[in-house]
């Protein structure tokens, strides 16, 4: 019953099998191999658009490099103050952009609104050279709080970008989970609503270590290959990253994995509904469930071996449970049994006593 993150899960067997198939003979190195080119063509078919694709090993590298082509060093990157780039990437975006500033904005359930983004951009622009130049708005899909942006919401924020000459970046570490929830096409969730760069993740959804920068406007991608190399993220044996992408995108594995993870989160969320002393904090729209619980419930979870994450910057005990492509229904049900028992009023009183 390990729900700390989808990063703790294993690797999809299909991906491991393709890695083994790739592990023979020789191949051109440094992303010039046929497999990487094939993945690029597959992504172009899936997204219905010509793209520049740069495979990298980590989500932090993907985000930081993707942002580096969208802003000058004196630029401002506006994002949710819950965003991974803002809270969890150790100033990598600032480093890779040469000094651009992340501007964290209040959000509702992890989502920025077009109105709040516009207000912040107007305020920054009015300060002239005394404030960083508004350059990028970054969205996380699905958000760090397990919610998703609808296409219409993205289009409204994109309109703000166009009005003020900004670019739109998307951190898609859990893009597949959002896609599975919304039942729209990848194109309808990205370039069709104004996304310039998508940092697409596969690692959280069954890959070993596979992330990628997708650039929809080729004019923006000029020089990114040099940035990837300079940053030390051009893998010499890149075909082994691309092998993961090939398996991930084949036979809808990426969507099958994300649909299962989402279904397990909904199963957990439904089971928690109505339990005493437990409150679901944010809507369960992808594969993350956030709950507020009393101290005795935390004690009971820890004693029962259920593993979770404590979520910072929120009052009380806010816990995060993340499901994965290989989360078992039995694990969900066992966790619910612990929570149900721990949340009974008489049980809470006995533990408190």
Image (spheres, rainbow, N blue to C red):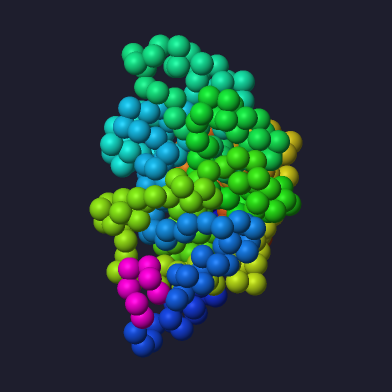
Residue at image x 65%, y 72%?
251
Q: Is residue 305 visible?
A: no
Q: Which of 351 and 169 is in front in this view?
A: 169
Q: Residue furthest bottom?
A: 25
Q: In which quarter of the image is residue 63?
A: top left
Residue at image x 51%, y 29%?
165
Task: Please provide percent x and percent y for residue 242.
Answer: 45, 69
The secondary structure that dominates the magenta segment is loop
Residue 30 within the magenta-colored segment of the rendering: yes
**207 relative to 282 in the view: left or right:** left
Q: Which of 265 and 172 is in front in this view?
A: 172
Residue 321 within the magenta-colored segment of the rendering: no
Residue at image x 37%, y 42%?
68
Q: Nearer the viewer, residue 331 or 243?
A: 243
Residue at image x 36%, y 80%?
27
**6 relative to 86 in the view: left or right:** right
Q: Which of 215 and 144 is in front in this view?
A: 215
Question: Which residues lie in the magenta part?
Answer: 27-33
User: Total label count?
Assistant: 0
Q: Residue furthest front?
A: 219
Task: Please provide percent x and percent y for residue 182.
Answer: 71, 47
Task: Please provide percent x and percent y for residue 55.
Answer: 42, 61
**185 relative to 236 in the view: left or right:** right
Q: Which image quadrant: the N terminus? A: bottom right
> Is 230 placed above or below 109 here?
below
Task: Please provide percent x and percent y for residue 106.
Answer: 52, 23
Q: Can residue 57 be seen in this view?
A: yes
């Amino acid at each position: 019953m390990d729900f700390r993150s989808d990063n703790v899960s294993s690797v999809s067997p299909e991906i491991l099998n393709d890695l083994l198939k790739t592990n023979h003979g020789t191949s051109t190195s440094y992303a010039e191999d046929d497999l990487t080119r094939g993945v690029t063509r597959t992504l172009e078919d899936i997204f219905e658009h010509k793209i520049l694709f740069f495979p990298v090993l980590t989500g932090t590298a993907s985000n930081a490099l993707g942002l580096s082509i969208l802003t000058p060093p004196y630029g401002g990157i506006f994002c949710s103050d819950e965003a991974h780039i803002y809270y969890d990437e150790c100033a990598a975006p600032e480093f890779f952009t040469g000094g651009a500033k992340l501007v964290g904005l209040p959000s509702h359930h992890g989502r920025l609104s077009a109105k709040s983004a516009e207000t912040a951009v107007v305020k920054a622009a009015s300060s002239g050279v005394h404030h960083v130049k508004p350059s990028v708005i970054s969205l996380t899909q699905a958000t760090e709080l397990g919610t998703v942006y609808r296409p219409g919401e993205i289009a409204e924020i994109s309109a703000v970008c166009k009005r003020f000459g900004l670019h739109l970046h998307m951190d898609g570490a859990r893009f597949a989970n959002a896609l599975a929830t919304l039942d729209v096409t990848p194109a309808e969730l990205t370039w069709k609503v104004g996304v310039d760069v998508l940092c697409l993740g596969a690692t959280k959804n069954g890959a070993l270590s596979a992330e990628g920068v997708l650039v929809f406007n080729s004019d923006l991608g000029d020089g990114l290959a040099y940035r990837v190399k300079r940053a030390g993220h051009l893998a010499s044996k890149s075909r082994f990253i691309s092998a993961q992408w090939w398996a991930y995108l084949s036979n809808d594995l990426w969507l099958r994995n994300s649909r299962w993870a989402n279904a397990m989160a909904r199963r957990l969320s439904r089971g928690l509904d109505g339990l005493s002393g437990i409150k679901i904090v944010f809507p369960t729209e992808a594969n993350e469930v956030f709950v507020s619980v009393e101290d005795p419930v935390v004690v009971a979870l820890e004693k029962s071996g259920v593993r979770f994450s404590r979520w910072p910057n929120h009052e009380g005990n806010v816990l995060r449970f993340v499901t994965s492509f290989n989360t078992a229904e039995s694990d969900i049900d066992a966790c619910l049994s612990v929570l149900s028992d721990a949340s009974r009023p008489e049980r809470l009183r006995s533990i408190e006593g």
